[in-house]
């Protein structure tokens, strides 16, 4: 029984650590999409275009857009997975693919 609690607490701590900052949440999302090299090596910059154009929408969502400088290429469509939206929910951050312009 104690081992189950240790595993559960360890899992919760890891999830909190991986979603405690916008950049780590984005890297975790890209890693879980199946692109470990891009998750580790790509730089993350603010997506100034989307942050300016959709300012009011992002303010309502409590979110901010980020861009990967070396984005992964989706295998099915050969499209670049460049722009992501990172939302703040409480003290955690959650990332999702936002799309191209």
Image (cartoon, rainbow, N blue to C red):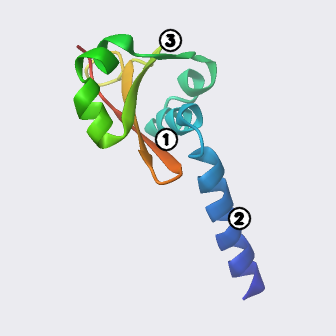
Secondary-structure class at tag 1: helix
The residue located at (35%, 23%) in the rendering is 75
> Residue 10 got which mark?
2
**Residue 97 or residue 94, whichever sits in front:** 94
Residue 96 drawn above or below residue 73:
below
**Of pointers 3 and 1, the one earlier in the residue sequence:** 1
Quarter holding the C terminus?
A: top left
Secondary structure under the numbered disc 3 in the rendered image: loop
Q: Which residue is mark 3?
A: 70
Q: Nearer the viewer, residue 77 or 70?
A: 70
9 lies left or right of 33: right
Question: Secondary structure under badge 2?
Answer: helix
* Residue 22: % across, % down: 53, 35
| Tag 1 residue | 32
Can residue 79 be seen in the rendering of this structure? no
* Left or right, 21 with reference to 30: right
- Is 51 placed left or right of 94 in the picture? left
Q: Is residue 29 left or right of residue 43?
A: left
Q: Position of residue 23 (x, y in %)?
A: 56, 31
Position of residue 7 measured from the top left corner of the image (x, y, whole percent) = 70, 71
């Amino acid at each position: 029984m104690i081992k189950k609690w240790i595993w559960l607490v360890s899992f919760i701590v890891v999830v909190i650590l991986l979603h405690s900052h916008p950049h780590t949440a984005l890297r975790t999302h890209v890693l879980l999409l199946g692109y470990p090299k891009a998750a580790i090596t790509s730089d993350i910059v603010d997506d100034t275009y989307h942050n300016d154009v959709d300012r009011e929408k992002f303010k309502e969502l409590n979110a901010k857009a980020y861009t990967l400088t070396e984005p992964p290429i989706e295998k099915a469509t050969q499209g670049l997975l460049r722009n992501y939206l990172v939302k703040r929910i409480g003290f955690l951050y959650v990332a999702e693919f936002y799309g191209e312009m």
